Image (cartoon, grey):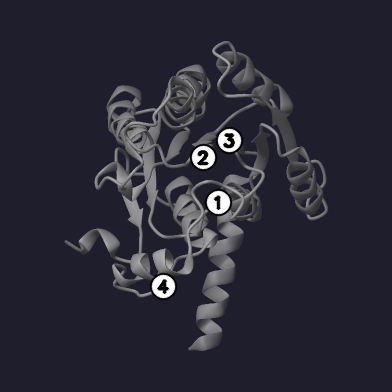
Amino acid sequence: MIVSKAINVKIMTLTEQQNNNGKVVFITGGSGRIGAQTARRLHQSGMNVVIHYRNSRQNAEKLQQELNAIRTDSVKLVQADLNDNDVYPRLIQQVIDQFGRLDVLINNASSFYPTPVGQITLQHWDDLINSNMKAPLFLAQAAASELSARQGCIINLVDIHAQRPLAEHTVYCMAKAANAMLVKSLARELAPAVRVNGVAPGAIAWPDMQTSAALDEKSKQMILQRVPMQRKGEFDDIAKTIRFLVSDAPYITGQIIAVDGGRTTQQ
């Protein structure tokens, strides 16, 4: 029985690779954390990958070398600041030029930090709105024609706090709520040629200690107490969900899957 299951998994993996061979995925903010693990998973499934980065060139090049060592010339890099209003069509064209096509757009790039009321600035607003709402919209618009021609799909990284606000993160939560509506709106507008879905992470990984969003141990434990599974998730939990939506969900569109250990079931 165990041997049979292993054979079935291997056959499914080979079939997935055959179905995805030649397809191209573009991942914004793909040099680290969720973006990097998603690149690994989709690359493993047979896709070529274009990784976007803003400042993390060293991390992006390291990931590119890692994946190209597995399959030569299967990963390319593009650099861009998504705060630039003129960058979106140019960036999508640059991605298409790399491999001659684009099949999947993953809007992963995101700024995240607290903005307590009374301390919110226009700079906070521009940064959080641009990365979490504006860039996903205009990148999707720029890519829509190519994705339609390829019967492709779009995946947005949303957040469980798009529905349940996180204290002192008003602007971020507003931007992610708009991102969630963008998923549903684009799913209607781009159907039937393009599927559009979202993934909403819960407590997947703690914010980097170098950022203003870093948490102390007490705060971490308070969060985990509200998670029925009593642990945080992993980057790969998100990456596997994205891979499912890309490769194995041809009749799913307009949906946002919470990957949160059951946290959104709590009052």
Marks 1 and 2, how far apart in space? 8 Å
Residue nearest the viewer, comparing 42 with 9: 42
Query: What is the spatial separation of the Cα atoms under label 4 and label 1, in whole angstroms?
Result: 17 Å
Q: Earlier in the sequence, mark 2 or mark 4?
A: 2
Q: Percent from the top left, x then y, of residue 246?
A: 47, 46
* Residue 45 seen in the current view: no
Sequence-wise, the earlier of marks 3 and 2 is 3
Tell me the CA gap for discs 3 and 1. Answer: 11 Å
Using a 10 Å C-alpha cutoff, classify the residue at mark 2 as few (fewer than 14 neighbours), some (14 to 19) or many (20 or more): many
Could you say which disc has been placed on residue 231 in the image? 4
Give the total number of marks visible in the rendering: 4
What residue is disc 3 on? 28
Three-letter amino acid code at the position of disc 3: Thr
- The residue that appears at 44% across and 67% down in the rendered structure is 232
> Separation of disc 3 and disc 2 at Cα?
5 Å
In the picture of the structure, the residue carrying the numbered disc 1 is: 34
Q: Position of residue 68 (x, y in %)?
A: 80, 48
Residue marked by disc 2: 108
- Please give the name of the residue rendered at 63% of the width and 20% of the height, measured from the top-left corner: 91
What amino acid type should be assigned to the residue bearing mark 4?
Arg
Snapshot quadrant of residue 195: top left
Identify the secondary structure beneath mark 2: loop
Marks 4 and 1, the one that precedes in the sequence: 1
Q: Nearer the viewer, residue 176 or 112?
A: 112
In the image, 113 versus 90, the foreground residue is 113
